[in-house]
Image (spheres, rainbow, N blue to C red):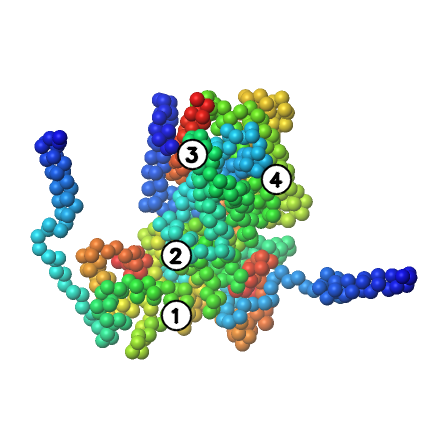
Amino acid sequence: MNENRREFIRKTGLGVLAGLGVASGIFPKSSFETAVASTTHENSSSGTRWGMVIDTRKCKEGCTKCIDACHEVHNVPQFDNAKDEIKWIWKSPYENVFPGESGQFVSEETRERSYLALCNHCDNPPCVRACPTQATFKRSWDGIVAMDYHRCIGCRFCMAACPYGARSFNWRDPRPAIQKRSQAYPTRERGVVEKCNFCSERLAQGLKPACVAECPEGALTFGDLNDSQSEVRMLLEKNHTLQRKSELGTRPSVFYII
Amino acid sequence: MIEKALKGDRIYWGWIVLLLVIISAGVFSYINQLTTGLTLTGMGRDVSWGVYIAQFTFLVGVAASAVMVVLPYYLHDYKAFGKIVIIGEFLAVAATIMCVLFILVDLGRPDRVLNVLLYPTPHSMLFWDATVLNGYLLLNIVSGWTVLGAERKGVPPPKWVKPVIYLSIPWAFSIHTVTAFLYAGLPGRHLWLTAVLAPRFLASAFAAGPAILILVSYILKKTTGFDAGKQAINKLSVIVTYAAILNFFLLGMEFFTAFYSNIPGHMHGLQYLFFGLHGEGQLVPWMWLSVIVGFGSLLVLLIPKLRTSSPWLIAACIGIVVSIWIDKGVGLIIGGFVPSPLEEIVGYIPNLNEIIITIGVWAIGILILTLLLKVAVAVKAQDQA
Amino acid sequence: MMKIRELILIFGGLALFFFAVTYAFWQEGKPKKISTPVAKSPSEQCVESGEYMRESHMLVLDEWRKSAVRDGDRIHVTPDGREFEKSLSTCFECHGSRGFCVNCHTYASARPNCFGCHHEM
């Protein structure tokens, strides 16, 4: 037994070990390759994904036509107090709708406008994750985050989970507070959660959502985000847009042109 | 065995009647809530969980803390806990039942509660919470009742109960961990979005739970003459001490991460609770009361001479319970909702109907605990006779 | 030995209990006739036979509800190829209004909660 042979065996052994290490990925091939850890998720789920682009520049201050239309079509009750309040779509100031966006030296015009807020029909919805009965679920065929009022137990876990405050609970019987009963959509019972449904009942009839149809300024555009030829995608191509709290990874389907 | 709960003196029956009266008031208020809706609570669109869910959170901790007597006694054969272990298990039973009731009274549609089982949803933490809570209730009823029943007959407990008891040990940790996951996994609720929430829950549970156990032991000693033993109480008070230290340590971690990183969203919840945010700070006095009482009690517990003196220990235990009840049962849940996702500050004040229901549920739990302990004490007394 | 008085008490009590329990069956006569609701029909035929619908319309509606809400399958196709939109409103196109339902529901003491939200008065 000589030194050389011992050395040879030792080196071979190390070589094999290193080779195994590379093969199994313990040692990276190069430590200097960079990858991007995306926080805002360029990827979208496949199939139809309904979405909306809101051109906030066109949205007129003081106009509530979209809100009124939505709330009338869907029999959303009007309570006078904030505690019982139910809303599917509403207007709030910049710092409330976009709390993560910088308010420093933001133009006066941007700050003083108010912005529409509604359910974002997230591609990755936390409310759906939280719901213990699948009463709220993401529709596999078009991405709408829907509510099954028949199944909701009223635990309000989804309200805690929604980072956009888009959900309302029926703290009391809503019917006395419905101004004009619309037969296009059912009312709700006391004790269940509700929110914007992207007008799925109108989409089924080939109509656009009520808010989109009613806006006299054409500020709202609705369409399939996964269709590269759709109107919404054209707008997204041409304009810089924001999604609310995109850093949370929820992938909202509502985009804002500021 | 249950018949032993039917024999008692006037004080015992007076206590039972008092609890029943309180429970009736609670039931009446609940019927009120059922017919009118949850609008009869202080909750609203922004603070959508309130005192019910807060009590639930606190009581899951009390339930889980039974493990602090079960583990030393059954796993390490720590004999001094021989008499107190059944009190711990029955406290867990009563606390778990209260937890389930607090969830029930919080539901908008309690008639549909079985939907949780009809449509099992593994990605929902609430589904797991319902599962582990009910499992824990069953484990503790079975193990406590079986061991006690064997003791009454003067025979060793059946062999099959051992695995049940062993299973209840990790299970106890699981109930409070899953309860923390209800909150800690929600994006956009900064106060809750912290990895130390589950450890914090466990630490506060293992401080408040054994503290309640010590207090219950003193009450039992005073009213029935049942003595859990000085050594058991001493050991429990040490557990309370260390758990309380850990609890405040973890609370300090929250402050460091939020305020050193200086990320506004992370600071908001704590600012609102402890200092007030934009002039709104309805919970500020509560939170400081919690901190001051908590630290004061901890100081007492840290001094061996005071810790081993009954009056001081009782005061310190009450202090720890009050401190943690405020922290978990008031601050944590409300603070998670303020400011709202749209960064609006909306307060919450529970109203009368809600408070009566809450007290009613507590009374149900205390009634169950009274009856169970009555049985346990009677069996133990027969042992000694 | 049991006294006669005790026997009378026991059997009298049993008889009273028996009578009370079976009281409903002692009632004279047959079920009250109610007018059979008739469809005023744009479509000649319902989605299923009249007999099936009388017994099981709730199953049809529940199935409609589930498939429309949860699977987005909003069109019911009968075996002979006719198509209906899965909606309570579809029923009312032929069957007039809620009155059609209420008549029998009242008689059968059935209290479905459909009308809380759909076609409430």
Q: Do the residues under discs 1 and 4 have CB atoms within 8 angstroms?
A: no
Do the residues at discs 4 and 3 belong to one chain?
Answer: yes
Could you tell me if the residues under marks 3 and 1 are in contact, i.e. CB atoms within 8 Å?
no
Viewer-proximal residue, A100 or A128?
A: A128
Residue nearer the viewer, B141 or A43: B141
| Label 3: few (<14), some (14–19) or many (≥20) C-alpha neighbours in 10 Å | some
Residue at the image position 64 percent from the left and 49 percent from the top? B263
Q: Where is residue B259 in the image (x, y as percent from the top left)?
A: 65, 44
Which is nearer the eye, B237 or C104? B237
Instruction: Determine the CA span between mark 4 and mark 3.
Output: 42 Å
Measured in 3D between alpha carbons, the distance from the residue under mark 3 to the one under mark 1, in whole angstroms, is: 57 Å
> Quarter holding the N terminus of chain B?
top left
Chain for disc number 2: A
Q: Is residue B283 left or right of residue A9?
A: left
Badges 1 and 2, same chain: no
The residue to which callout 3 is attached is: B149
Q: Which mark is residue C73?
A: 1
Any part of residue A167 in sight = no
Label 2 vs label 4: CA separation? 38 Å
Does mark 4 fall on the same chain as mark 1? no
Mark 3 belongs to chain? B
Q: Which amino acid does label 4 sit on?
A: Leu
Residue position for label 2: A151
In the rendered structure, are the residues bearing label 1 and label 2 in contact, judged by CB atoms less than 8 Å apart? no
Could you say where residue A21 lies in the image, as x and y percent from the top left?
74, 63
Mark 4 and mark 3 residues within 8 Å of each other at the beta carbon:
no
Subunit of label 4: B
Q: Position of residue B76 (x, y in %)?
A: 59, 36
Per the image, label 3 sits on a secondary structure element best described as helix
Task: State whether residue A242 is above or below residue A82.
Answer: below
- Host chain of mark 1: C
Mark 4 lies on residue: B251
